[in-house]
Image (cartoon, grey):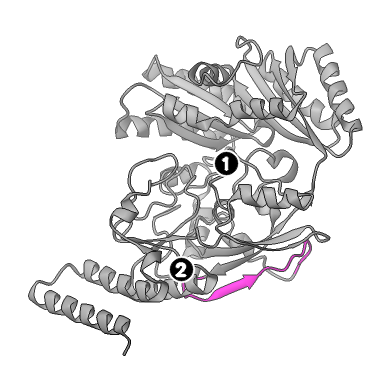
Amino acid sequence: MSSHKTARVRDEFRLLLWHSVCPPPYTEYRMQTLLNQLIELLGARQVLTGADVSARPISWFDPAPMRAGAIVRPGSTEEVAAVVKLCCAAGISIVPLGGMTGFVEGAVPSAEQIGLSLERLNQIEAINVDNRTVIVQAGVPLQALQAFAESNDLHYPVDLGARGSCTLGGMAATNAGGNEVLRYGMSREQILGLEVVLATGEIVSNLRPLLKNNTGYDLKQLFIGSEGTLGIITRLSLRLRAQHSSYSTALVAVPDFQSLTALLRNLDAQLGGRLSAFEVMWQEHLRFVIDQEQTHKAPLSLDYPYYVLIQAANYHDLEKDIFLSALETLLEQELIIDAVIASSMAQQQALWAIRDDIECLTTGLAPYIGYDVSLPIDAMEAYVDNLTEAIRAHWPEAKVIVFGHLGDGNLHLFIHIGPDLSDRQRSTINELVYQPLASCQGSVSAEHGIGFQKKAYLQYSRTPLEIDLMRQLKKTFDPDNLFNPGAIFD
């Protein structure tokens, strides 16, 4: 017997002897036994416990220390499957961990659970330039794929501010959207196939790089947006697009909400489908970012009610002239009352930096509650006005910051009511935000999913029958409630 195995047997004997004298709680015993098995499977460096776990924050938005019983870091799909089998046998649940940039407490393991990090599955495995497809592992950061695609004169069109941290597996599990949904759609539209580990430890893999594959049920759709509750995504087959030669970018001021909607319609028509971003910032948002973060310079006067960051993707220089001509026409029609047009990549980046500065909001508004909702565009103005009035009826000095991808119906809200925020106040604000969405056919979650944070409000966006069908899917794929238990619904 090797010295490693001899030491392990000796340690297990000592543990059993100690337990016979002073038995620990059963869950603690199961956890320790599981950890020994995981160390034997993966090696001690890939099973983090104690201070190595608590040194990690719960998420990018919550700096509190993580509390998982352990964080395991498998290096392949086969190792993920082996971990799942061990956890299933031990009766200890698993919470899959991606880039931890989610907004809804969707990946928060407890001390009685295992956090399964996919950070070592970080390889871009293969690209087919002619087919415009790529095979990636789930732990690849979005920005890494974007850079890789660009080096091959291709483009991966899902983009968001957390691009350096968010991972492709987590984005698939939450069906992430972002800045270019208006033209290319959500993550779902880019995914051609998935490899997934089921709760049985079986691996279901269909990574065929096909745009058309009409062979029965499209099983990958069950796992996209499932938030790690039905299976663990380990590899993805993704669709790439042609690389643009350049972007045309402008920040414009708009006099009223009616002009916003007219502006969107006109730009979409005049740019012939090249409109890739239509990011709206309410006045309070732009003012707060400029005042709070001294590194940003105000591109326009801060006295206008609405601002729109417009971007069009160009494939040849003629399209730049079409963009300028469209803006000139809209200025003449007074749908736009002021504008600044980026004339260089640096100026484009400066404009986007204002829109993407979420950290400014999270630090400057703390304590705050952030929301990610969607609703029909024609219902937005009344919704925001009524919500702001309702919030300030309770807390007159409250700050309500609103911005979003208006072209796809998505609004982000940051609400700050003062230096203290109790659970009771949070619950009141949640109802004020979510309840009106039911009557205007809105959604309590546009991009980030449900997690634990929004499951009490799922009823405002889904019927009882829909929720029951989702429960049945969960019971079918994960009858022992092994994966991310309690997320989406109890």
| Residue at x 74% of width, y 16% of height | 339
Q: Label 1: which residue?
A: 446
Q: Secondary structure at mark 1?
A: loop
Residue at mark 2 to residue at mark 1: CA–CA distance:
25 Å
The boundaries of the magenta stretch are 198-214
Which SS type dominates the magenta stretch?
loop
| The N terminus - image quarter | bottom left
Could you tell whether 65 is left or right of 443 in the image? Answer: left
- Residue 404 forms part of the magenta stretch: no
| Residue at x 52% of width, y 55% of height | 465
Q: Residue 414 appears at what percent x and percent y?
A: 48, 28
Q: Nearer the viewer, residue 28 or 221?
A: 28
**Where 8 sits versus 310, above or below?**
below
Could you tell whether 63 is left or right of 467 in the image? Answer: left
Q: Secondary structure at mark 2?
A: loop
In the rendered image, is residue 340 in sight? yes
Could you tell whether 234 is left or right of 146 in the image? Answer: left
Q: Residue 249 appears at what percent x and percent y?
A: 75, 27
Q: Label 2: which residue?
A: 478
The outermost residue toward the right is 318
Q: Amino acid at mark 1?
A: Ala
- Residue 208 forms part of the magenta stretch: yes
